[in-house]
Amino acid sequence: MQNGVNAADSNPPATFSESQERRIVWLLCLLAAVHVFVFSAAAPFFNNVDEQIHLDLAVKYSQGHLPRSLEPVSAEVVPYATLYGSPEYVGIPANFPGGQFPPPPWTQPLEKVRPALVAKTAAWRTVTNYEAAQPPLYYTVAALWWRLGKGCGFHDGRLLYWLRFQNLLVVAILVWMGFAAARLVFPGRRFLRLGVPALLASLPQSAFYSIQNDVLSPLAFGAAFILLVRLLRADVPGVRLGTLTGLALAATFLAKISNLPLLAVSGLVVLFKIGCLARSGKLRAAGLALAALALCVGLPMIAWLAWSKHTFGDFSGTAAKIQFLNWTYKPFGEWWHHPIFTPHGLWTFVSGLMATFWQGEFLWHRQPLASPVVDAIYAISSVGFVGVAVIALLSRSTVSTEPQRQALWFGFWSFIATVVFLGFLSIIYDFQDCFYPSRAHPYFTSGRLMLGALIPFLLLYLYGLDRALGRVKNNWIRPLVLIGMILFMLISEILIDWRLFPNAYNWFHM
């Protein structure tokens, strides 16, 4: 390989066979599931990231009901929301009698809590589900899991946690997919092949501890990323590869509407491949594969866009939600007054986005369940290591092959496209009286909205770390740095989230 790119693996501290490496990854999949189980069980219902709303859609899908408007919360969900919701996400003790949060209703005599339950029930019956136009993939999967839980005899709070625990399978598959992507892009770099799944297994992203539709995005686009890299490398892509690539891209779209930037970059990658095939005279031979790709991605997308237009009045289905939230579009001339165009505002946006991309957005007593120091470390390391990766990519001598360059650039532009998209959304709206985003803080800093780019981002992040350690000759340094990062992630998460574990509303106390 060129310029010693793989030198660090020439004398690795330990020699693993392929089967041993796979066993390590299987162990990481198991550890990821345990990690998600522990923190999902510790977090009470219902968090501030619209968990009740996503539960409502999952239940409606399980009933065979596809919403046709911004409907009220279903009757089946109201008792769950009334009984099992902890007030500690968005409440403060001073708002309650005696300056203390009330204990769970199921631990109190019915006569004592009946008035409060009646009032809550009446309030929940008036709540509107403003996410009704979201694409259907997550809710279809969640609906099947919900019905399976009922079939297994789960009910009440246990059934709620059963639905949340489907994320154990999601994250285990995601770890294996991260390994597959790293092995494809870095076949000769054990540090990177194992580093990506190790970080995925330790990721403190609270979206995986919640019922919400963001969790399928990294799976769907992770599969699409792998398949598109294979498409780029294929001399003449086959029909099977084209079909699977199209289906993975369709799943990316049907998982979350905010994945549109990833689809745009993917479309450019396909056009680039078509250009290469045309120049080599092989476009006709690849015609069936490209047609299969177009059909498999196009038909599901067109079907859902047509449904949204027919049902909600616009192709994206977001107009009704925007109207419900009372957002308005700014005149074009006012876009440029946004603070994101100042150095301080840009860093506020980028650092906030990176912090929630790693850790999530849970509040606790109306305050972010986070640490400013930890947030800063995630933000600075993300910008720093991705920056080092880009510098290495611009210096062709540091990358071993052109296919590797293509894959990493694809990952970089996928990540950047999602950041730019959220920045664009921050600029174009006047958020009126909305709590988040708001006029005082007009930034979409929801990292969960860019989780589709998680695997490409970690490939870049670790590649940048590897390049930063490029002159280190000791073969133990890289594994030790990785272990240190994992310990930092886990220990900081435990310290930050420890206050959740004694909560009387969570799974451990139910």
Image (cartoon, grey):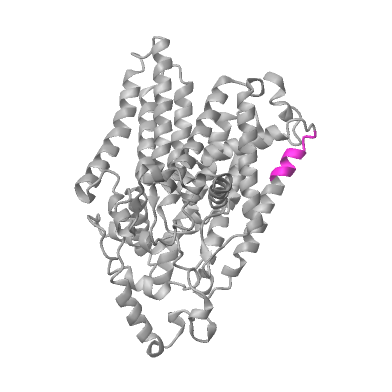
The quarter holding residue 280 reads top left
What's the residue at 32%, 76% (across, down)?
Answer: 121
Q: Position of residue 486 (x, y in %)?
A: 66, 49
In the picture, measured across the screen, residue 65 lies left or right of residue 248, that is: left
Q: Is residue 243 at least partly visible in the picture? A: yes
Rendering coords of residue 243 (x, y %): 35, 30
Residue most toward the left?
Answer: 310
Quadrant of the frame with the N terminus: top right
- Residue 51 belongs to the span the image colors magenta: no
**Quarter of the rendering containing residue 393:** top right
Q: Position of residue 439 (x, y in %)?
A: 44, 57
- Residue 23: in sight, yes or no? no
- Judge whether 437 appears above or below 412 on screen: below
Compared with 131, 192 (above or below) is: above
Instruction: Classify residue 502 by image quadrant.
Output: bottom right
Q: Main secondary structure of the magenta part?
A: helix
In this view, the residue farthest toward the bottom is 111
Provide residue 405's location: percent of width, then percent of height: 56, 24
Residue 271 appears left or right of 313: right
Residue 318 higher or lower than 13, as above or below:
below
Q: Residue furthest right?
A: 474
Q: Which residues are magenta?
A: 474-482
